[in-house]
Amino acid sequence: MKILVISQHFPPEKSGNASRIFDMCSHLQKMGEYVTVLAPHPSFPPGSFKRKWSVFESRKMNDVNIINLLAWQPKNQDPGFVGRMAYYLSFPLHAVIWIFFNFRKFDVIITSAPPIFTGIGGIPAKLIFKKKWVMDVRDLWINASISLGFLKKGSLFEKMSRVYEQFCYSSASFDLRYY
């Protein structure tokens, strides 16, 4: 099977999500699946990596194909709401463009959340190209955003995020929720 994984974080980034996604992809590859990961150029934590502005770079890591796509790269630890949203939205929108040109190269897509916006890539893969879509949900990202003060409870942004989240859950072929 040819599997496409979309993740906002992937090594060499140092985060729990990057590590878990790498482990999952490595195990799938060892089981005989053909795995390609779409991820932005490494930029987390902000300031840890040199900023890259190339549209597309590919590499291999443990036989897993990694394609780094252009995304906004914050310069500092707290980029503010606009910078944070530019980072979270520019990558999945670029992933959608990649999917439109490469949808024949995979059978199933796995989107890993957080952040919830990685699901943006799963929507056209499932609804337009009829691919199986698995949502890998590892955190209640909206709730965490509220508790950290990034999102205001009851705000229009929270309501829109919840509608989008529910749309993703109902559209996905399968969702894995770890919370």
Image (tube, helix red, strand yellow):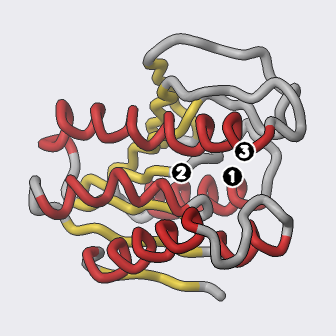
Give the mark nearer the N terminus: 3 vs 2: 2
Q: Secondary structure at mark 3?
A: helix
**Where's residue 139, x and y in %?**
66, 75
Return the residue at label 1: 18
Quadrant location, the N terminus:
bottom left
Return the residue at label 3: 81
Query: Image quarter for residue 98?
Result: top left
Could you tell me the amino acid type at mark 1?
Ala
Q: At 68% from the left edge and 27% from the top edge, which residue is drawn? A: 73
In the displayed structure, 154 sits above or below 91; it is below
Could you tell me the amino acid type at mark 3?
Phe
**Where's residue 93, x and y in %?**
39, 38
Q: At 76% from the left edge and 40% from the top edge, which residue is drawn? A: 13
Q: CA distance from mark 1 to mark 2?
A: 8 Å
Marks 3 and 1: which is nearer the front? Answer: 3
In the displayed structure, 156 sits above or below 80; it is below
**The one of 41 and 170 positioned closer to us in this rendering:** 170
Q: CA distance from mark 3 to mark 2?
A: 21 Å
What mark, if any, has residue 7 been given in the picture?
2
Quadrant location, the C terminus:
bottom right
How dense is the environment of label 2, judged by Cα within 10 Å: few (below 14), some, or many (20 and up)? many
What mark, if any, has residue 26 been given in the picture?
none
Q: CA distance from mark 3 to mark 1?
A: 22 Å
Quick check: can you spot residue 139? no
Q: At 50% from the left edge and 34% from the top edge, which residue is drawn? A: 90
Q: Secondary structure at mark 2?
A: loop
Q: Would residue 174 be found to the left or right of residue 66 on screen?
A: left
Give the mark nearer the N terminus: 3 vs 1: 1
